[in-house]
Amino acid sequence: LRSRLCSQFESIFSGFYQRALSLLRRRPLPEDGAVYQANVLFDSQVEVILESLVDILSLHGMENGPKSVGSMSTLEELFLAYDCSPKESDVASGLLVELSRCCGGNVDEDGESILPSMSPSRSGSS
């Protein structure tokens, strides 16, 4: 069963969570009331998505209390299952890159820092 769910989970993490984070990062700055209201609605929807991501990433190890010695976190398991596999896409690093970008980090697809002069500003001015 686990091998059959691998591609489904990859789609959920790469297609759903990473896409939601990317859309959150790229939403337009409000210039009028309509854009502001659209952002408020979108923000409330993304909040639910991000809460579910936190729940998933917090699942592992909670059955025995806080992280037990020698156990891996959910993010570490995602990295081993997907990022280290030549057949799968980079799920864990993709999530970390998008989370970093949402927090204002300037990183490329490999998680390497981008010089501030290379990144476009949200306001459109340099």
Image (cartoon, rainbow, N blue to C red):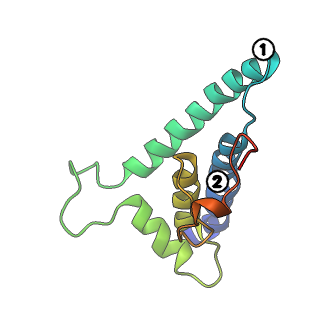
- Residue 37 location, x and y as percent? 74, 18
Query: Does 37 sit above or below residue 107?
Result: above
Provide the secondary structure element on which disc 2 rests: helix
- The residue positioned 69% from the left and 43% from the top of the image is 122
How many dots with numbers?
A: 2
Q: Nearer the viewer, residue 72 or 96?
A: 96
Against 101, residue 6 (above or below) is below
Residue 94 point in image, percent of width and height: 59, 63
Extreme residue toward the top, this view: 33
Provide the secondary structure element on which disc 1 rests.
Answer: helix
Q: Is residue 67 left or right of residue 78?
A: left
**Which mark is drawn over residue 33?**
1
Q: Taking 24 as reference, is 52 left or right?
A: left
| Residue count near mark 1 (Cα–Cα under 10 Å), binned few <14, some 14–19, many ≥20 | few
> Residue 34: x and y, percent?
81, 17
**Image coords of residue 101 (percent x, y):** 57, 53
Q: Is residue 1 visible?
A: no
Residue at x 29% of width, y 55% of height: 61
Query: How many residues crowd mark 2 within 10 Å: few (<14), some (14–19), many (20+)?
Result: many
Q: Which residue lies at the image location 52% right of the left edge and 64% below the top edge?
A: 92
Residue assigned mark 2:
18
